[in-house]
Amino acid sequence: MNGQFTDEYCESAVTEINTLNLMKAWEVVKKQDDMNVIRSTWAFKLKRYPDGLIKKFKACFCARVDIQLEGINFFEMYAPVVQWTTARLMLILEVLLGLKSKQDDVTAAFLHANLGEDEKVFVDMP
């Protein structure tokens, strides 16, 4: 945050917080001694066009899931990814049908999954 693009990264961090608030990604609760609270961190990325020009500044608020405890913070993990055979099939169809592919990004993609009724994850605020 102390680099050349401090203002741009701060603006993208504010956008990230506003997006998470709109999605009701969290509920602020008072910290209690029996809670296993996961630390949080920020990930910043400068996205560029192929010619090197700046496309956008991205800030992601991240829960440090690498320090979660199985049976306390989570009971199972799942990361939805496309199978390579599906990606290859889509590329083949693109060539055969003369289509053009386009890349897209899903905002806050990992927040679209639901926790179980008894599952609660406590994360330090950004």
Image: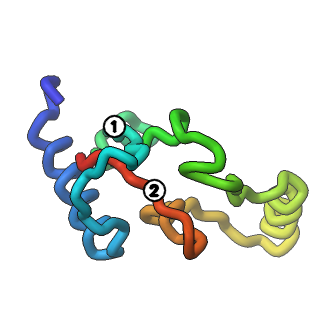
Q: Secondary structure at mark 1?
A: strand
Q: How many marks?
A: 2
**Residue 116, percent from left and from top:** 60, 71
Which is nearer the eye, 44 or 21?
21
Q: Quadrant of residue 89?
A: bottom right
**Residue 5, percent from left and from top:** 16, 33
Q: Is residue 16 above or below residue 18?
A: above
Which is nearer the eye, 107 or 102?
107
Q: What's the mark number on residue 16?
A: none
Of the 4 image quadrants, the one containing the N terminus is top left
The residue at 25%/49% (across/down) is 125
Q: Is residue 81 above or below residue 40?
A: below
Which is nearer the eye, 95 or 16?
16
| Relative horizontal placement of residue 109, taking residue 48 as reference (left or right) | right
**Residue 79, percent from left and from top:** 68, 54
Q: Secondary structure at mark 2?
A: loop
In this view of the protein, can residue 64 be seen by the observer? yes
The amino acid at mark 2 is Val
Q: Is residue 121 above or below residue 3?
A: below
Task: Tell me the distance, in whole angstroms, between the alpha carbons under discs 2 and 1.
Answer: 15 Å
Residue position for label 2: 121
- Residue at the far front: name it: 34
CB-based contact (under 8 Å), mark 2 and mark 1: no
The amino acid at mark 1 is Thr
Q: Closer to the N terminus: mark 2 or mark 1? A: 1
| Relative horizontal placement of residue 90, taking residue 11 as reference (left or right) | right
Residue position for label 1: 41
| Relative horizontal placement of residue 1, taking residue 74 as reference (left or right) | left
